[in-house]
Amino acid sequence: MSITNAFATSRSGLMATATWAEVTSTNIANATTDGYATRNVQTTTSTLGDVAVTGVTRSVNATLTAMVRREYSAVGTQEAISSGLEIYGTVLGSTDDESGLGALLTEFQSSLVLLASDPSDSSRQRAVTSAAEAVADQLNTLSSTLESTQKTNQDTITAEVSEANAELDQLAKLNAAIQKETGDTERRATLLDQRDGVLDSLAGRMDIRVTTESDGQITLMTSGGTELLKGTEVATLAHDAEAGTLTAGAIEITPRATGVRGFDEGRLAGLFELQNTTLPTFQNQLDEVARALIEGFTALDDTLDAGEPGLFTDAGAAYDAADLTGLAGRISVNSAVLPEEGGSLWRLRDGIGADTVGTVAGEAGLINSNIDLLEGDMNFSAEAGLGETATLTDFVVALTTSQQTTLSSAESDLESLSASATTLETSRQNIQGVNLDNELIQLTAIQQAYAANSQVLTTLTAMIDALLEAV
């Protein structure tokens, strides 16, 4: 090798070492930066021994990253359901809760039994109306809480869709910037870090599939196959609250909808599950309890004219089968038995439609019929999903158990999935995160490489000086 070639080789070595040192120092500086993937210097050596830096790459594992994002989506689903039902679950209580609907219904039934033994006792009559009002008030409260929960859920969907659209737009811009970046540069690596961070965030909202194209850009689709992003073209998401649908451009992608190329996991999937299935089912179950009370007590009272309500009413009116939704929020005790509203307690014994006090003060026929109603089987809608025949008490117990199970299952799944996501994320960080021990070893190697190349240059300089002196 000539002296000139030796100079060139040593110089290229020093330049490569300088790049190596710069990348290593960047790794160390970003050891605690979220989403930062360790950079690696790629080099080649020519036949003459010259060293050239061909690019700066990132330490990533595409398969593991895809697994992490799937877990993020699954966690997001249960997170949305769990947090969405938290307040309602507290108001609902458990089957053993003394202030729960089941306990209040039992108290109402017990007050009727006591009144049947002395139908003229005004204090027992008052106990019945108070217990009836407690049942109606709890149904009102539960229905109101569900309505508030649905409103909050709708607002959250709107916010999530807005954030998802912002992230899709950001991904489109990053796609364009990455396409313009030629080669494996440090800037390209930074852009890829940013894009991966946005994809991680979006995965928490919806289950996505990512395909990397030859030019470095990505194509993004729902897990069902609907295209959300291709290059810089974005299919904007839109939520129709009235229809309960989600679209991407002109294509419906409503989560978990039959026959739709949407997605099944992510916070949006959980929110739509609440909006379209869980909350309407909960409301229907409560409305069935209210309907059974209003219809049952009305049918037993032969003092009523057609269209008049019994002990329980729909906001003062009789039950209308065409207006079931939200009935639990409107149920109330008939003012005809409430002295504070101009009514009379004795109508509990003589009938809501009675105009005068009955002649037989000890008559308990209507009261006993009411007791039999509550103790016997009643019919319920199959849509409530709790069986079509049961006593009202058993139906309420099944309602409480079913609804609390939905919440507790979401909480349990969230805990399990979060642990799994944490484990996978730790594995990913072990691969792409900065290992300071390794970087310090790199610094030692850099120092040795620099010293070696410097020594060669020093030796070559001495050789040239010696030749010049000899001339």
Image (cartoon, grey):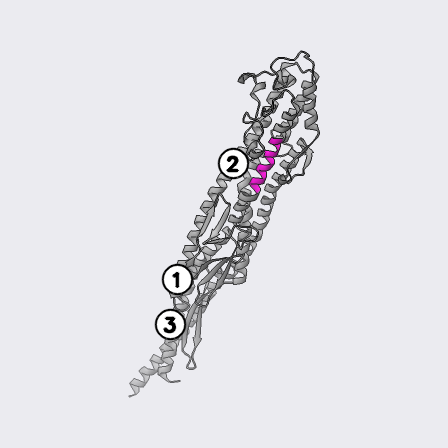
Using the numbered discs, state the Cα–Cα distance from disc 1 to disc 2 in whole angstroms: 44 Å
How would you classify the magenta stretch by its main secondary structure?
helix
Determine which of the numbered discs, if any, sits on residue 147 in the image: 2
Residue type marked 3: Met
Using the numbered discs, state the Cα–Cα distance from disc 2 to disc 3 in whole angstroms: 67 Å
Q: Which residues, given as a range, are shown in magenta?
A: 278-291
Residue type marked 1: Ala
Which element carries disc 2, helix, strand or loop? helix
Q: Foreground residue, 311 or 405?
A: 311
Q: Which residue is mark 1?
A: 176
Q: Is residue 250 on the magenta stretch?
A: no
First-in-chain label (2 vs 3): 3
Q: Foreground residue, 1 or 433?
A: 433
Q: Is residue 341 above or below residue 264?
A: above
Residue type marked 2: Glu
Residue 422: x and y in percent read 55, 53
**Left-right relation of 235 to 120:** left
Q: Is residue 282 on the magenta stretch?
A: yes
- Examine the rendering and report whether any part of residue 341 can be seen: yes
Report which quarter residue 370 is drawn in.
top right
Determine which of the numbered discs, if any, sits on residue 15 in the image: 3
Which element carries disc 3, helix, strand or loop? helix
